[in-house]
Image (cartoon, helix red, strand yellow):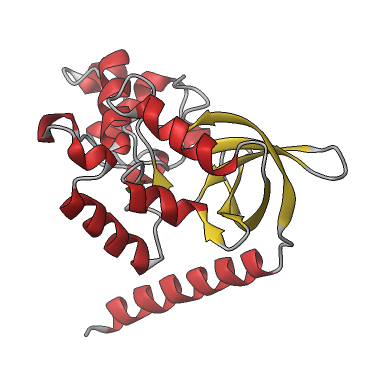
Amino acid sequence: MGLAMRIVRCIAFLAALLMALDASSQPDIFGEVIAIADGDTMRLLTAEKSQVKIRLAEIDTPERGQPYASRAREALAELVFRKPVRVVYVDTDRYGRTVGRVYVGDLDVNAELVRRGAAWVYRKYARDESLYRLEDEARSARRGIWSLPEVQRMPPWEWRRGKRAAAVPVARSEPAAAGFECGSKTYCREMRSCQEALFHLNECGLARIDGDDDGMPCEKICR
């Protein structure tokens, strides 16, 4: 293995370690679930009467408009609605939601949704290898999502990418005429327009400006 590759792996390991240490320093959140937004997002009320929006970590459920979206929401509601839960903090996402593993007693809700076939393992963020085994079992047993025809089993992140791309046409012809140039900018804060951000993502391959990998860069200006 070359020196450069060893350095890259070392940096990646240290970054993962720092993230794990930061998450471990955060206290668990306790409260009663008072609202279900979709199959992987809910709102809970703490004992201090504070409302916290929770995004279940490492999983992804069908979006509204996708097959099985309402049934995934019902599955989450069945498991947590009006019940006391414990949330093990993992991260805070770009929308300000607390990302975490949710437990009702000893039941790992995130894992249970995957086991039931109500959720996909979110490939980009999943670290728990056991979730993949649960997904394989659900697929083999044709539970939930896996009972649908194959053409309807589109991962939510791919569905979002396709929907966003269709909503905002990408100007791929004559990019130089618009004054854009690959390599000139690397961060969202440098982009002057959504068209410019789309150019750098699609023409230059600047993946860092599409943090959630949904095909829509710099969502503060492309929404």
Residue 193 position within the rendered picture, expressed as x and y whole percent measured from the top left: 44, 20
Counting from the top left corner in percent of width and height, residue 26 is at 71, 62
- Left or right? Give the position of 94 relative to 66: right
Q: Position of residue 210 (x, y in %)?
A: 38, 39
> For residue 28, which quarter of the picture?
bottom right
Q: Note whether 10 is above or below 52 in the view shown.
A: below
Residue drawn at x 48%, y 35% is: 188
Residue 179 left/right relative to 13 = left
> In this view, which residue lies farthest toward the right?
48
Question: Please, is residue 21 above or below residue 141 in the view?
Answer: below
Q: Nearer the viewer, residue 71 or 123?
A: 71
Q: Going by the image, does 164 lie left or right of 203?
A: right
115 horizontally vs 46: left or right: left
Residue drawn at the location 16% of the way across and 18% of the way down: 173
In-front residue for pair 14/177: 14
- How far from the left and from the top, in percent, is residue 137? 24, 58
- Whether residue 58 is visible: no
Q: Which quadrant is the N terminus positioned in?
A: bottom left
- 111 above or below 183? below
Looking at the picture, tell me which residue is in the foreground, 198 or 34.
34
* Residue in the picture at 18% in, 33% down: 148
Residue 140 appears anywhere in the view: yes
Query: Residue 20 appears in which quarter of the rendering?
Result: bottom right
Q: Residue at x 85, y 45 (%)?
A: 47
Work out whether residue 106 or residue 4 is closer to the camera in this orientation and state it. 106
How many numbered circles does the render carry?
0
Residue 5 found in image quarter: bottom left
